[in-house]
Image: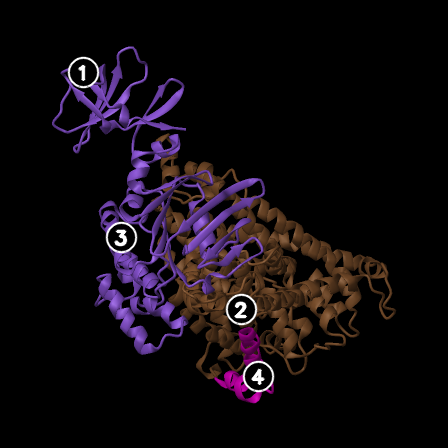
Chain colours: A purple, B brown
Amino acid sequence: MSKLVLKNIGKSYGAFDAVKDFSLELQKGEFVSLLGPSGCGKTTTLRMIAGFMPPTAGTIELDGQVISSPEGVVPPENRRMSMIFQSYAIWPNMTVGQNVGFGLEVRKVSRAETERRVDKILEVVQMRGLKDRYPSELSGGQQQRVALARAIVVEPEILLLDEPLSNLDANLREEMRFEIRRLHDEFKITTVYVTHDQSEAMVTSDRIVVMNKGRMEQVDAPHVLYGKPRSRFVAGFIGRTNFVEREGATYSLRPQAIGLSTAKPAMHGVEADVVDRAYLGEYWDYQVKPLGETKPLRVSTAPTTIFELGQRVWLEIDPAAMVRVE
Amino acid sequence: MRLGRWDSTWLLWLLIVAVLLFLVVSPFIYLVATSFTGEGTGGFTFENYAKAYGRDRYVQALVNSLELGTAAALLAGAFAIPLAWGVSRTDMPGRGLVRLLVLATFITPPYTGAVAWILLAGPNAGWLNKIFVALTGADAGPFNIYSFPGLVTVIALYSFPYIFIFTTAALELVSSEMEDAANILGAGTWTTMRRVTLPLALPAILGGLIICFLEAIALFASPAMIAIPARFNVVTTQLFQFFGNPVRVEVAAAYAMPLLGVTILLVLVQRLITRRKGFVSLTGKGGERRPIALGRWRWVIFGYAMLVGAMSVFLPYLFLLQAAFSKAWGRGFSLDNLSFKNFHFILFEHATAALSVWHSFLYSGVSATLGAIVTLGVAYIVARRLMPFAEVLGFLCVAPFVIPGVVLAIGFYAAYAPPPLSLYGTAMIMILAFTTRFLPIGYVNASSAIRSLNPEMEEAVRVLGGNRLTALRRVVAPLLKRSLLGAWLLMFIPASRELSTAIFLYGPNTKVVSVMIFDMSEEGNFEYLSALALLLQVLTLPLLYIGQRAIGRDFMLRRTAT
């Protein structure tokens, strides 16, 4: 049986649909991301799962029991979930230990047991020794770890994360992605993760739901999503791509799937001119215009592969790399 | 697990709604209804209005009020605007001192100021007259506080802090870059001030003038002490006479209507002016600010500030102290006139003086607590949209702002003096009236405090299994402690000196210190009165200290405080 089931849920404000006809099933222990640009309805969906807002259509079931429907919702405090907020929402009036122990306290766990579990989880998130600090004395990354510990220590049925890394600087964000995945592998908590950052979703998730304008565009494992995007939106949102029109259909062609050389390749060769280029350290980003075409293609090559502006080059395009999109 | 949108906290919200109906809506409805109720008959009638405006002198009192308000607001502007500019935008020396003087003025009750000025500028016996006579050898001094200009001066001296607060708040949002832009195009300091700085602050200055006008026409104490001996009436003193024996509450209600109408109208105008969108600099953040170097002129403006300070603080308190510590104030500063008997008398001998101080603090404490709870609750409901039409509750909390104290008192009298509640003369009616009167101050503060709280703080509680009350108790309340203390003090301090509602509602056993001081002034006991007035000020100082420690130096002089 699925752990969490969203059946055709929708949220509308008058004529505006924030979320429409959204269906998703999560298996126990699965990590699913909701990925999309701002305003796509991902946070709304998460807040409906948490019970902060009722859906205007559809139902949400946890372990086969309806917890949300337009007729009513089980309030957040009775859902046995936990959530990590964009602002961390660490309570500044409580110490780290009190923050982390709060959920156990309201669940009436004994004091000794609370103590033990708080110590253990602080160890796991590498915050041992900071138990009696107040949040204002912590760095952003440490506050993030407190938020993680506080959410995990109660062993929730579902863990919800709302853009938890968006307030961290780039290096820390990268580190915390792996940290979140590591904690998931350790505790196997069923998780829904909302983000607008594709690499965050790809590092952490078993499956990614790409959302656009309140609708679900595609649900798949990260590598499938990248390799076989089904819509123009998904292809454009996950990574960079070229759109190529052939015989009335649109195809997505990734810049790194195109070979670039001075010599004519054995197969699938196309002649082109280099019209623009940028050096980005990890790779070259070329704009090349195939002869007789008006639209240039983007091609990525190794940083050592150097071509001059205006140089005539050969492209090698494998038809198998061209993915048809809607 | 149960599906549902109901939880027990709804009961709390319903209770708050009931309290607001009781505190705000019902007195207002009674006020209006009573003005149409026949005296003795109880039937519907327009007769009260005919009686209230049937005599020339009643109409004249209304005209006097409007003239008084206009003159006092303009004079207060002349006091406040240069000081505000000097303090917030220039390198005038002693800026901290000037702020302190404005604060001292602000916490001086109007009746204390009026009494001090009677000591200073009473005909013949007033100190300024005596000094004038001693210096010039003339027969009599030129000053007479018992006159229209005298009343205007006293009111302006103790209401100019309102304009000061509004003006400094606006000037502090004008960035130096805007002035630099004028400078680089060739404008000097004075041109820049006249063409750039002042116009940007103008809406706020006008707003302050309006508040000052409203304060002046709603005042009861100073007119009662000064206008009545000078043989003219204003609306509030006339209302008090309708409340004499026998109490003619119906006529009083009808007579209060123009005062209420003018106030509502001007508050709306004030809101429109200060919210005008054209002045971007007043809505955004100001950017960097540097004080303007005034050169020698800084001593001129400092001198002016000291003159205002002398009139509002130094001279009044000097002579209040003299009177409070003397056997007879007219005998001047000499050691054989020095005495502690006045303090001994009011504290230990007088039947009700010490008790009245206790009453003031007790009633103010209870009403500030009640006000803080109600306004926090409403601000929370509004900010978190917990109920449909929550904005209406917020509106009810700020609505008493447009009801002058005397008018509010008449509403309370009409609503709760008669059976079934028969609250007249009880502590309860004083507490409730004080609560309503200062509800807007509490609401503005509670609401800005709650809006500064990220709702995710509470959502984090709920998602971990705590209900809304747990969130309020464990997170919201602890985080708002300081701002709540601030709101409490901002309600408590004015309530502890409130006269205009108290004078209509007190009974023999519920006299508060303001009423006591007013009574003593009628009896001419200036030595006892000065001692009592100073005692009230001294008792306020620890509260100011607590407030400054908890929420910042200027907590009384912030824009949100008014």
Quarter location, residue A321: top left
Q: Amino acid at mark 4?
A: Leu
Q: Chain of mark 2?
A: B
Identity of the residue drawn at 85% across and 65% down: B38
For the residue marked with disc 2, what is the amino acid? Ile
Q: Is disc 2 placed on a helix, strand or loop? A: helix
Mark 2 touches mark 3? (CB < 8 Å): no
The reply to whether the magenta stretch includes residue A13 is: no
- Give the distance between the C-alpha atoms of the residues marked 3 and 4, in whole angstroms: 69 Å
Boundaries of the magenta span: B340-366
What is the chain identity of the residue bearing mark 1? A
What is the distance, in whole Å, between disc 2 and disc 3 at their CAs?
Answer: 45 Å
Distance from the alpha carbon under mark 2 to that under mark 4: 27 Å
Q: Is residue A209 above or below residue A289?
A: below
Residue occupying the point 54% across, 44% down: A12
Query: The residue under label 3 is which amino acid type?
Result: Arg
Q: Which residue is mark 1?
A: A313
Q: Find the distance from the CA under tag 2 to the CA under tag 1.
A: 77 Å
Residue extending furthest toward the left:
A304
Query: Which residue is at the front of the view, B514 or B10?
Result: B10
Q: Which mark is residue B355?
A: 4
Disc 1 residue crowd, few under 14, some 14–19, many 20+, Cα 10 Å = many
Q: Picture coordinates of residue A313 (x, y %)?
A: 18, 16
Q: Position of residue A134 (x, y in %)?
A: 29, 65
Q: Nearer the viewer, mark 3 or mark 4?
A: 3
User: A262 or B470, which is in the foreground?
Assistant: A262
Q: Would you name the residue on which mark 3 appears? A: A181
| Disc 4: host chain | B
